[in-house]
Amino acid sequence: MPIFEHAYHPYDGPLTAPRRLPLAIARRGLAEAFASRLVVLLLGAAAIATLVFAILIYLHYNLPALRILRLAVTKLVPIDAQFFTVFLVIAAVLAFFLALWLGPPAIARDQANNALPLYLSRPITRPQYLWGKMLPLLLLLSVVTWLPGLFLFVLQASLAGGQWFAANLHIAAGIFLGSLVWIVLLSLLANALSAALKRRWPATAALVGLFFIPGIVGGILDNFLTTPWGRLLSPLALMRIIWQGLFRLNVPAYGFVPGPDGHRVWGVLPPVPAWSAWLVVALLAAGCLALLARSLRPYPPIR
């Protein structure tokens, strides 16, 4: 073709559907996540934990295996709501480390390298950009929380029968809803801090501090002011209250309470209603969304 015929021609090829635009960002995020050895290690730890709990369930219904191991059924861990709660706590810890490693750099790198204007100059909105950044983390956290949890529940129900399934259906709902609240809260907090602080390590330190420092302050309020409401300051305590409500458990919290003679003694703290924990989690999520709406701008406003 002669050089004078190389004129400008607009692109006339196929266009990607708007709903599929965030998937391009998500695919890149997943590729970077699986390139990390720590992510693979945490996923492997989640698989091992699931295997251990599955073996415990299987042993309850395999008498030859119990005879080989010289174990009695009465010595095994009972398969009840507490059993699945312990698994969910282990899975939540692994999910926290995944979010701590993958969440803070997600948006901070784009902010630090001034890449956000390049994203938003294309036919992609800020909510789509945020969804593309959050989707890899949500998928990986699901892999270590509610997906293996429901697998264990289905395994137990298939071995125990339909009567156990009908009587314990709330456990499946607790696994799914409890995991969903945890992974959404982790993803929102990690991405909000990443967008606001614009650097990976400050965002990582802020995420760690947000989960542990308020718990210390809340414990001080509980012990010195004899009030149960200090626990609402800690995201970990909030999830504990929500999980207990979903799994219909009543595990008391301990601290210093007024004794019969007026002196402070170690005892059971008053319970905190579950609705208050749900309300605080909803306010945290709304605050994260507001922070993201303020921080996800291609250029800062000129004043």
Image: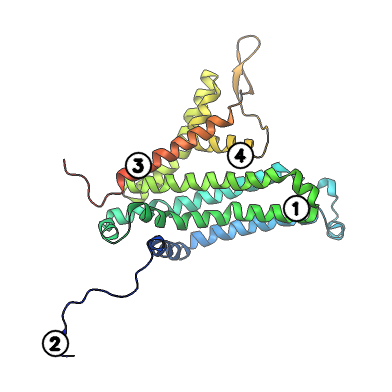
- Taking the image as shown, residue 147 lies to the left or right of residue 297, namely right
Badge 4: how crowded within 10 Å, few (<14), some, or many (20+)? many
**What amino acid type is highlighted by mark number 3?**
Leu
Q: Which residue is mark 1?
A: 157
Q: Which residue is mark 4?
A: 243
Task: Using the image as rendered, state which of residue 79 and residue 184 is in the foreground.
Answer: 184
Q: Which residue is mark 2?
A: 3
Eyeballing the image, is 8 above or below 135? below
Q: Which mark is residue 78?
A: none
Task: Using the image as rendered, state which of residue 275 and residue 20 is in the foreground.
Answer: 20
Q: Counting residues from the N terminus, which is met first, the one under dot 4 or under dot 2?
A: 2
**What amino acid type is highlighted by mark number 1?**
Ala
Q: Position of residue 9 (x, y in %)?
A: 20, 77
**What amino acid type is highlighted by mark number 2?**
Ile
Residue 24 in view in this figure: yes
Q: Counting residues from the N terminus, which is met first, the one under dot 3 or under dot 1?
A: 1
Distance CA(mark 3)–CA(mark 2) = 52 Å
Q: Position of residue 155 (x, y in %)?
A: 73, 56
Element at label 3: helix
- Taking the image as shown, residue 174 lies to the left or right of residue 184, namely right
Q: Residue at x 35, y 73 (%)?
A: 14
Distance CA(mark 1)–CA(mark 2) = 72 Å
Q: Residue at x 52, y 62 (%)?
A: 40
Which mark lies nearer to you, 4 or 1?
1
Distance CA(mark 4)–CA(mark 2) = 69 Å
Q: Residue at x 47, y 55 (%)?
A: 137
Quarter of the view holding residue 283: top left
Eyeballing the image, is 194 above or below 1? above
Distance CA(mark 4)–CA(mark 1) = 21 Å
Q: Counting residues from the N terminus, which is met first, the one under dot 4 or under dot 1?
A: 1
Eyeballing the image, is 70 above or below 267? below
Eyeballing the image, is 103 above or below 223? below
